[in-house]
Image: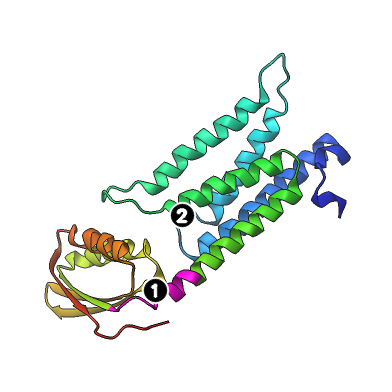
C-alpha cells in the first residue's frame, strides 16, 4: 500500500511515471464526472476528465522548469487562473441569473485533483476524488429530504408552443433546478396554447429565481400559483 502515500516519481522511471500519473488523473476525473453526468450537468464526464488530465499535464510540465528557465510554481498558479475563467463561463448565463455554481466548483476541485496527480501523488488524487463524489452524493440526498419539508406549490403556465420551441426552453430552465424539487405535467389546451403544470417544493429563493426565469420567456402568457395548505413535517 506504499503507492497510496508515496510520490510515484520516486519509485517509477520518468516515462512510466508520467503515463501512470496521466491515467490516474483520467480515472480520478471520471470518478467525479460520472456524478455530474448522472445529474445531467453542463460539465459532465468528458469535461471533468479533460480538466483533471489537463491540470495534471500542466503540473508535470511545470516540473520540467528549473531555476535557470523559470519557476515551476507559476505553472500551478496559472492553472488556478485558467480554471477560474472556465468556471465563470459555466456560471454566467444570458438569462441574467446565477446558476451552475456547484458545477463550477466541481471543475475547480477537479483541477486540484489533477494537480495532485501531476505532482506524483496519485493516491491522494484518488482519495480526493472519492471524497468529492461522497460530498456530492451526500448533499443530493440531504437536499431531497430537505425539499420534502417545504410546502408544495403548484404553478400553472400557459404558453404559446411556437412549434415546440417554447417547451424546449422551459425544460432547459427546469434542468438547472433540482429534479427532486420540480415535477412537471404538459398539456395541450387548444390550438396555439399549451399548459405546463409544475409541482414545486423548493426553498424560497430558488422558487423566486425559477419563476423569474420562466416569466422572462416572451411566449409565456399566463402564470398562476397555488400553495398547498398541507406541508410535510419532519
Q: Tell me: residue 168, above or below residue 28.
A: below
Residue 162 placement: quadrant: bottom left
Sequence-wise, the earlier of marks 1 and 2 is 2
Q: Is residue 50 visible?
A: no
x then y, percent, for residue 193: 13, 73
Q: Residue furthest bottom?
A: 230
Q: Secondary structure at mark 1?
A: helix
Q: Quadrant where the N terminus lies?
A: bottom right
Segment colored magenta: 142-152
Let me know if residue 201 appears in the view.
yes
Question: 215 or 151: nearer the eye?
Answer: 151
Q: Which residue is drawn at the image coordinates 33% and 70% (left, top)? A: 202
Task: Please state which of the two labelled residues, at mark 1 or mark 2, is closer to the viewer.
Answer: 1
* Residue 101 percent location from the top left of the image: 42, 52
Q: Secondary structure at mark 2?
A: helix
Relative side of 27 to 195, left or right: right
Task: Indicate whether 80 appears above or below 148.
Answer: above
Badge 1 vs badge 2, beta-carbon distance below 8 Å: no
Q: Is residue 91 left or right of residue 132?
A: left
Which quadrant holds residue 182?
bottom left
Q: Which residue is mark 2?
A: 102
Q: Which mark is residue 147?
A: 1
Which class describes the residues within 10 Å of circle 2: few (<14), some (14-19), or many (20+)? some
The residue sitting at 64% across, 55% down in the picture is: 129
Of residue 211 and residue 174, the one placed in the foreground of this image is 211
* Residue 62 place in picture, x, y as percent: 67, 28
Point out which mark residue 20 bears. Answer: none
Residue farthest toward the front in the current orientation of the protein: 234
Amino acid at each position: 500500500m506504499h503507492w497510496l502515500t508515496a510520490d510515484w516519481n520516486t519509485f517509477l522511471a520518468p516515462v512510466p511515471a508520467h503515463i501512470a500519473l496521466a491515467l490516474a488523473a483520467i480515472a480520478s476525473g471520471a470518478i467525479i464526472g460520472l456524478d455530474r453526468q448522472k445529474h445531467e450537468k453542463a460539465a459532465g464526464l468528458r469535461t471533468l476528465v479533460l480538466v483533471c488530465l489537463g491540470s495534471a499535464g500542466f503540473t508535470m510540465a511545470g516540473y520540467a522548469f528549473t531555476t535557470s528557465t523559470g519557476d515551476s510554481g507559476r505553472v500551478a498558479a496559472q492553472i488556478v487562473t485558467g480554471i477560474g475563467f472556465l468556471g465563470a463561463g459555466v456560471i454566467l448565463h444570458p438569462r441574467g441569473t446565477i446558476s451552475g455554481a456547484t458545477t463550477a466548483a466541481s471543475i475547480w476541485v477537479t483541477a486540484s485533483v489533477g494537480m495532485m496527480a501531476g505532482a506524483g501523488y496519485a493516491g491522494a488524487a484518488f482519495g480526493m476524488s472519492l471524497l468529492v463524489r461522497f460530498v456530492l452524493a451526500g448533499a443530493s440526498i440531504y437536499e431531497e429530504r430537505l425539499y420534502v419539508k417545504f410546502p408544495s406549490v403548484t404553478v400553472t403556465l400557459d404558453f404559446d408552443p411556437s412549434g415546440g420551441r417554447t417547451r424546449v426552453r422551459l425544460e432547459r430552465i427546469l434542468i438547472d433546478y433540482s429534479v427532486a424539487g420540480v415535477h412537471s405535467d404538459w398539456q395541450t389546451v387548444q390550438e396555439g396554447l399549451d399548459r405546463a403544470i409544475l409541482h414545486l417544493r423548493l426553498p424560497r429563493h430558488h422558487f423566486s429565481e425559477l419563476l423569474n426565469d420562466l416569466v422572462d420567456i416572451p411566449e409565456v402568457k399566463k402564470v398562476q400559483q397555488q400553495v398547498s395548505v398541507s406541508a410535510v413535517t419532519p
